[in-house]
Amino acid sequence: MSLEHLFNGLMLGMIYVLIAIGIGMIFGMMNFVNFGHGAFYALGAYLAYTIGAAGGSFWLALVLAPLLVGILGTAVERTLLQPLHGGEQSLHLLVTFGLALICQELTILIWGPIGKPVSVPAFLRGGVDLGFTVYPRYRVFVVAFTVVVALVLWVCLERTRLGAIIRAGTERAEMVNALGINIGLVFTSVFGLGCAMAGLAGVLAAPLVGVNPSMGMSVILLAFVVVVIGGLSSFAGAVVGGLLVGVVQALSTLYIPAASELVIFLVMAVVLILRPHGLMGQV
Amino acid sequence: MSARLRPWLLPRRLMTAGGVLLLIGFPFVFSSLLATEFLTWSLFGLSFNLLLGYTGLLSFGHALFFGMGAYGLALSVIYLQTPMPVALALAVSASALTALLVGMLSIHRGGIYFAMLTLASAQVFYFVVLSWTEFTGGDNGLSLRGIPVSVRRVASWQLDSPTAFYYFVLAIFLVAALFLWRLTDSPFGRVIQGIRENELRVRCLGLHVERFKLVALTISGALSGLAGAINVIQVQYVHPNLSHWSVSGEVIIISLVGGSQSFFGPVVGAAVFVFLSDYLSRFWDRWILVLGVIFVVVTLYMRGGIVGALDAGRCRWTSWIARRRRGAPLKARGTAETARR
């Protein structure tokens, strides 16, 4: 087992972390299961491709794509998903599954069924000598960037007033409302933020895995595995779960390529049986 | 709401007989191949709805049972060279066993955990079948043509023609549907509906909730496997795609669009799905988009699906008729409720 593969796992894991944080925040705050999160991830990647194809730089895409995805997510939440709040979780799962399916077909309609390439920005090409190996610069960037983003988010949640409101909303939404804070506005912003994170993950992943219509559906499954393993509404859980899944996936692809997908689900099954609320979830 | 108290539109027996006659006459109007596909999906949907509509458990991995039945039949015909009826029995047993095993792991957690665990199990099966190339043919699948045993042979009948095979499938479908109907109307059926409505109450009544859920899941899995096996006999080919998550999605869609709160909802949904896919796919590659839109609209605004909407319409119609007869004013509020009992 080389450190290089471990690093690959960390990089994969951090991308999952970004997506899982989004799902976790949305679930923790609004008790809403968003099965369409993968669609926002795919949208971010496709927007990165479009911006790149229109002549924009990668850095522009890095800022613009998550913004657009976040706005779209907010719009979807406001229009379609409002009546579902407070209802059955199965219903959320079903509606967002339907929306994800529609989104997948729309991306094929707009961009075509074949995958599109997104190239690594010139600044980040080449390798970095990390001592134990020469590692692709872009991957180092992805890890560093996602760690920074996760840290910034964590600091916002733990140290700012808005973060306190969000955390309070996770525990007692009605109480926050009763204290005079417009919880509906907070809900919608959290949803938009979660979607923006998924879009950001999509932009980052685009040069690595390419852009194709089924990327949304394939990532959502893994994202839910991460969230379930880590604990549905725990920030630390999303991080731990994401890193764990990323590393396990990288290592199993190395040692048992045929069964790499299998291993992840077995891990999830084991975790669910032994610790039903996830590794870091509260009962 | 008991089925025997009042006629739906016409007396229920008449409607059932009419439905059966319609099914018998299908091949003369539509292609037998399409009709068989319709029956396969109806069976799949009915067995899925036993779990969703009647027990209240949402499974996102029913493609597992469909695929297990498909591969069970294919593998037993190819490697064990069993005649078709034996292979069918093996396929159904295999999927029942799978359902039992999956159930034992996932039945204790409800809601989205159950959905995720069933999805994960289906994915595990999908990847196993995809990778075990020596045994299952992997991405190339397995063809049932040219093997020693004729898979379309039952006793002394050779069911090679699509029409003959359709009637064979129709017979199986009617038996299975009758079984499910009697099951949902039995004490067992009442208990699982009780579990759907108020699980805690059922538990407090002293009934072993997990055991009932497990039995429901096993039956559902077994009949889904039967549907999968029939599908393989029809197309003479088996491929890992039969247990892809999109198949799980499709059975969910047909059950909800048709109406998960009624017995025949999934049959209506299957009809919509099969005929829509056949008709639309000729004009538009992205016809699934239409299906997705219908699905979202139904789940958001028409919880009872098509059957539910027809039912609501029927209530308004019969109450309108009743008020006409009484000479009451035509426009009144809240009439659906007063007309119900």
Image (cartoon, rainbow, N blue to C red):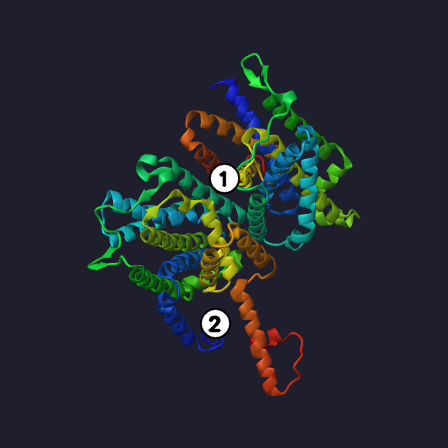
Quadrant where the C terminus of chain A sits is: top right
Q: Nearer the viewer, residue A256 or A106?
A: A106
Is the same chain shared between marks 1 and 2? no
Q: Is residue A127 left or right of residue B115?
A: right
Q: Is residue A195 left or right of residue B254?
A: right
Specify the quadrant of the image occupied by residue B220. bottom left
Outermost residue on the left side: it is B156
Outermost residue on the right side: it is A180
Residue drawn at x 62%, y 54% is A87
Amino acid type at circle 1 is: Leu
Q: How many marks?
A: 2
Q: Which residue is mark 1?
A: A272
**Element assignment for label 2:** loop
Specify the quadrant of the image occupied by residue A116. top right
Q: Nearer the viewer, residue A157 or B201?
A: A157
Where does residue B50 sit, x and y in percent of width and height?
44, 58
Mark 2, other Cα within 10 Å: few <14 / some 14–19 / many ≥20 = few
Mark 1, other Cα within 10 Å: few <14 / some 14–19 / many ≥20 = many
Residue A9 in view (yes/no): yes
Q: How far separated are the C-alphas under marks 1 and 2?
A: 40 Å
Q: Is residue B135 left or right of residue A247?
A: left
Residue drawn at x 57%, y 77% is B317
Q: Nearer the viewer, residue B334 or B135?
A: B135
**Element assignment for label 1:** helix
Amino acid type at circle 2 is: Ser
- Determine whether B222 is above or below A73 in the image: below
Where does residue A214 sit, x and y in percent of width and height?
52, 40
Q: Which residue is mark 2?
A: B2
Q: Please report contact status of discs 1 and 2: CB closer than 8 Å, yes or no.
A: no
